[in-house]
Image (cartoon, grey):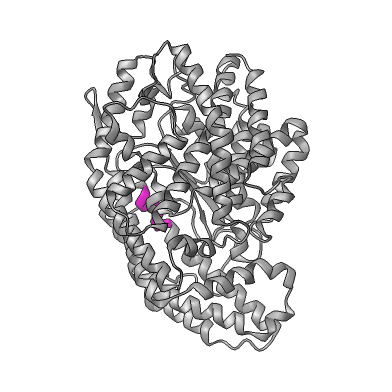
Amino acid sequence: MPSPIAVERPGDYPRRYVPADADLADWPTLEALLAELEARPLDSPTALTRWMEDCDELYACLGEESARRHIEMTCATSDPVAESRHLHMINEIWPKAKPIGQRLSQKYLACPHRRSLDRRFLFVHDRDLETEVKLFRQANVELEKEDAQMRQQYQKIMGAMTVVFRGEEKTLQQMAIHLESTDRAEREEAWRLVADRRLADRQKLDELYGRMVHLRHRIAENADYPDYVEYIFPKKLRFDYTPADCEAFHEAVETCAVPFMRRINARRKKNMGLSALRPWDLSVDELGRPPLRPFQSGRELSEKCQEVFRNVDRDFGGTFLMMIDRGLLDLDSRKGKAPGGYQSTLSEVRLPFIFMNAAGTNNDLFTLLHEGGHAFHSMAARDISLLSYRHAPLEFCEVASMGMELLCCDKLEPFYDDGEAARSLRQHLEGTVMFFPWCATIDAFQHWIYRRPEHTPEERRDAWRGLVARFGHDVDWSGLEDARDYAWHRQSHLFTSPFYYIEYGIAQMGALQLWVNYRHDPKQAVAQYKQALALGGGRPLPELFATAGLAFDLSKKTLEPLVAEVERALAALPE
């Protein structure tokens, strides 16, 4: 099948070790290259350095092959060829490559000459590698393969979901625009259609998730951990915060962000003249103005975003123009596309690719600003010599993306006139704080689930209900209890990226600090941000935050003044 990515290999980084015509999806070809690395003597610091460079080149090429196939699959989930190519990497290549990769890591760690290399530079690399070697279990290779297959099943189930709305078939992402309609009957009709469509696969998704939980618990037990929570923190290389810090974050959100959200809801209810808010009342303009429609097509979205990025920083604008010119965007929503949005780095050519489902909404605009931040991070770190350092910890990757949203949020003139730009800014600032309760809900839910792997589906449902009561909107769910109780099915991270969600909360706290700094000194804030992006993953997480001029802290001490600053900014905006 034709690839959605037009960029050809090898690009700006010619291969020295991997043959130009090597097919890394062919196991004998890949095995021979891995075997040579495993057998090669490391008899001097120079030999070790060259060996590390060759390992990185091979894994960059392999990673890009895998990424391209994943992109193909998410761009067309109903295409059997794309699905087969993606599953081939999951089922046939990575399970065979992982044990050899483990032996290569052990070979490096055992080499006496690594002590002659730059220890400060290699600190994070070696710390991470030692942890990964410690956690590796051969028995988990097949279990991780099975987990990846189940993640693919989730993508396929969700990618197939469409509804017929007033005679027209639409994806669930495309239905989002109807939730912004000033016609309440239209909003309700659209909301119920989407909710009912998700509920039609409720049992299938619930059973799939139950199997995932049990399998992930087995992975943790195999690695000698009592549960998946204790396993996932070292597995995700979380050295700078603990489950207890996550609980402190939940408490800070409950104390600072939930009251803010409920104040916003109370104002919304009053302005709309309602006795109670229903789920379909949360996205519409509360003053009855037409919904914001910043663009009509993915092309218009990308071209105007390029102008926004340029107005923040000339380098950002230039990078995004390059992405447009080189076909590194797939933005429009269509049937058969996987849900959501992501930025994926093509690790051999060292270029970012952005995938999303744009339907013309203000949220879509901010999704592209967000993914653009990830892309700029990837480009800032592309010349770092170590492959592992070209990717930062997720907690800081999301500072790059969420921070970019906030750097851009008052520069939306290419999309809006002054009044609409103020509306968009208000929506975004409110949404930034109102995200924290959802983040805490998802993270606390996962802590509950994986601490109790033998829970029943009914217990899981009740735990979710309790978290909705603790962190949720004050919304009337009468007659909609099933939709409320299974709303978590739409959060793909629970299925495809377990425990990848607290990163967003940590990063949002960092991004808000960046925004505060930018309001006081734009030039310095952008300079510090770019300096931190250029470090990639080469320094510990607190140092990355500090380089950007941010505090690494999950507590009320940091969150409370940020919420207060947002409220002050909102008070200065026109309605």
Q: Main secondary structure of the magenta part?
A: helix
Is 72 displayed left or right of 169 in the figure? right
Residue 501 visible (yes or no)? yes
Up/down of 446 relative to 112, above or below: above
Q: In which quadrant of the rendered view does residue 12 lie?
A: bottom right
Q: Quick check: is 425 in the magenta stretch?
A: no
Tell me the quadrant of the picture where the N terminus can be found: bottom left
Q: Position of residue 476 (x, y in %)?
A: 36, 24
Residue in front for this viewpoint, 457 or 300: 457
Image: 433 above or below 250: above
- 571 left or right of 143? right
- Across and down, in percent, residue 321 comes to 58, 40
User: Is 307 on the left or on the right of 22, as rendered?
Assistant: right
Residue located at (30% from left, 35% from top): 483
Q: Which residues are magenta?
A: 68-74
Q: Is 94 left or right of 322, judged from the image as shown?
A: left
Q: In what quadrant of the picture does the C terminus appear? A: top right
